[in-house]
Each structure stands twice: as C-alpha cells, then as structure tokens.
Image: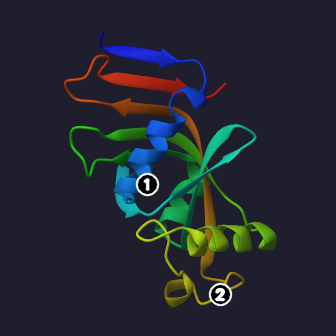
Amino acid sequence: MAYKIEETFAAIEAEFRARVERMVWCNVATVNDKNRPVSRVLHPIWEIIDGQPVAWTATYRYSVKSRHLAQNPYVSMAYVAEWQTPVFVDGIASWDDDPATKAHVWDLFLAAPEPLGYDPAPLFHAPDHSSYGALRIDPTKITLATLGGDPWQRIWRSQ
C-alpha cells in the first residue's frame, strides 16, 4: 500500500511527536513577493490545542520571513534529518503578538529538555522584547513517510 489516510491526528500523534522531537530542526519554506519559494531552517516546538497539533517557533518578528507571511501565510515544513523517516507538514502560519501567548511559547522552550528546549534569552532578550515573535503554524496536512514501509506514507489532514 502506498499511503494510508488517518482519520484523526491521535492516530499518528505518538509517531509524529517521536520523530519531530528527535529531529528538532526543520526546513520551512515560504513564498516571496515574486511567488518563488524561499527556505530556511527553524526550530519549532509542538503542542496539542483542542486536539489539534500546533507548531510554535520563537523567531524574529520583523524579518524577511515576516514580509513573506504577510502576503502568503502558507508554509511547507520538512523534517529530513532521518532520511528514511521524514515528516512533511503543510500549514498556515500566523503571528501571535499577545503578551501572554509570547510568554507561553517562551516557557515551552525553557521547559522542554535539550535539544528540543533551549533558553531563548541570548537571541531575544525577553518575551516582551520587540524583536521576539511567536510564530504559530496550524497544519493542514501532515505526512509521515517511511521509505520502504507499508504503507510508505501515513497522511492526516485537518478538518
């Protein structure tokens, strides 16, 4: 079987979390003002909100990435540190500038064990600093690939 569509995120949650928490870093592509893809490496941390996966990234609020997302919020993520078990995520990105949310994301990174967790202060100073942004990514599709597996892709789509 080439692929299997999963009805719920819960069906892939354990394997998804194991993979992304091992690989930590992923390639994230946005679209620039000339409708061309632009890739960069980001360090998301995932949590489940109302039964749905949400990625958070502590990143620079006013950057080229910010300009790209202002005109096109769709992103493509690829965790490929383990070539035989990559994870692909398509999603919609948005900035959450609420001070309580920014502090929450900051604390998620502080609380997680390394290498998933880290102290954001050397990069962003404090949760209320103007350069610090909490970027939220809501997946529309997650693909767990297992090269040589049966099925070789397990796919979940949001409602």
> Residue 126, image x and y in percent?
65, 87
**Residue at image mark 2:** 126
- Establish if 80 lies above or below 126: above
Q: Mark 1: which amino acid?
A: Glu
Q: Label 1 to label 2, Cα distance in Å?
A: 24 Å
Q: For the C terminus, give its image quadrant.
A: top right
Where is residue 12? Give x, y as percent: 50, 31
Q: Which residue is mark 1?
A: 21
Q: Amino acid at mark 2?
A: Ala
The foreground one among 85 and 137 is 85
Nearer the camera: disc 1 or disc 2: 1
Give the residue furthest to the top: 1
**Residue 98: where, in percent of width, then height?**
79, 68
Looking at the image, is 140 positioned above or below residue 96?
A: above
Query: Does the rendering let one see residue 98?
Result: no
Q: Does 154 sit left or right of 60 as displayed?
A: left
